[in-house]
């Protein structure tokens, strides 16, 4: 074998630039909302400004219990008039109701009610909906669904099946 035959050939590097994560997110928002990428970048910047305002409030010790975006509005959960005043002074929307702490506790109760069932796909606090969503597999037993549905504030929905490994075989 000649020396030339033993040389490994490497592919030429691509000249295409790798998009930044910000560009990818802006592209996704533009496609989802039917707007231009430039408009999506403006929407994301406004949301980032609102998030910075919220972070500033929490750094100042304003008592909040979670926040979520409703469109471009940042809705902040509060439980006192003073917190409401501080949140609204930042141009954010204040709302009273179940906060992250309450919903996390309820999610814990849902997990306990499921008793480790592999038919439970996920348990997710939903601040906007003021509830916890417990997703179960399509063929989940009625007893599991009933145990979860008994909990006030828990919505039981069918979720995508979770992957399981049973006896060294992959099942979906």
Image: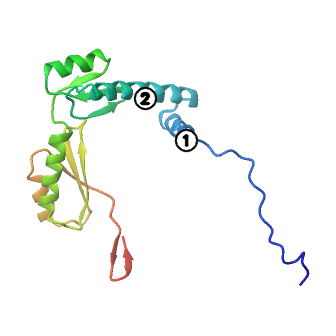
Q: Count the marks: how many?
A: 2
Tell me residue 121's x, y (percent): 27, 60
Tell me residue 7's x, y (percent): 84, 73
Q: Which mark is residue 24?
A: 1
Of label 2 and label 1, which has the lower sequence position?
Answer: 1
Residue 160 visible in rendering: yes
* Above or below, comparing residue 55 to residue 105 in the picture: above
Q: Secondary structure at mark 1?
A: helix
Residue 72 visible in rendering: no
Left-right relation of 34 to 152 = right
Please tell me whether mark 2 or mark 1 is closer to you in this view: 2
Tell me which colouring the rendered structure shows.
rainbow
Q: Nearer the viewer, residue 45 or 150?
A: 45
Residue drawn at 16 percent across, 53 percent down: 108
Q: Secondary structure at mark 2?
A: helix
Residue 20 sits in which quadrant? top right
Figure quadrant of the N terminus = bottom right
Q: Nearer the viewer, residue 103 or 131?
A: 103
Tell me residue 141's x, y (percent): 17, 67
Q: Nearer the viewer, residue 138 or 36?
A: 36
Residue drawn at 57 percent across, 27 percent down: 38
Q: Are the residues at dot 2 and dot 1 in contact (C-beta closer than 8 Å)?
A: no
Left-right relation of 65 to 29 = left
Residue at the far front: name it: 60
Figure quadrant of the C terminus = bottom left
Q: CA distance from mark 2 to mark 1?
A: 16 Å
Would you name the residue on which mark 2 appears? 48
Residue drawn at 53 percent across, 29 percent down: 41
* Above or below, comparing residue 14 to residue 66 in the picture: below
Q: Residues within 10 Å of mark 2 (few under 14, many from 20)?
A: few
Q: Residues within 10 Å of mark 1 (few under 14, many from 20)?
A: few
């Amino acid at each position: 074998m000649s020396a030339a035959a033993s040389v490994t050939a490497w592919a030429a590097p691509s000249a295409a630039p790798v998009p930044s994560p910000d560009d990818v997110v802006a592209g996704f928002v533009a496609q989802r909302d039917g707007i231009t990428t430039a408009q999506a970048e403006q929407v994301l910047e406004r949301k980032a400004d609102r998030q910075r305002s919220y972070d500033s409030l929490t750094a100042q010790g304003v008592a909040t219990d979670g926040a979520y975006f409703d469109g471009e509005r940042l809705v902040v959960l509060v439980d006192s008039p003073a917190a409401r005043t501080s949140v609204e002074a930042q141009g954010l929307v204040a709302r009273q109701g179940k906060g992250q702490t309450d919903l996390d506790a309820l999610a814990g109760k849902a997990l306990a009610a499921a008793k480790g069932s592999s038919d439970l796909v996920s348990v997710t606090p939903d601040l906007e909906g003021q509830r916890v969503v417990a997703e179960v597999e399509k063929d989940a037993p009625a007893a599991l669904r009933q145990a979860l549905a008994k909990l006030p504030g828990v919505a039981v929905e069918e979720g995508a099946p979770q992957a399981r490994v049973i006896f060294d075989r992959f099942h979906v």
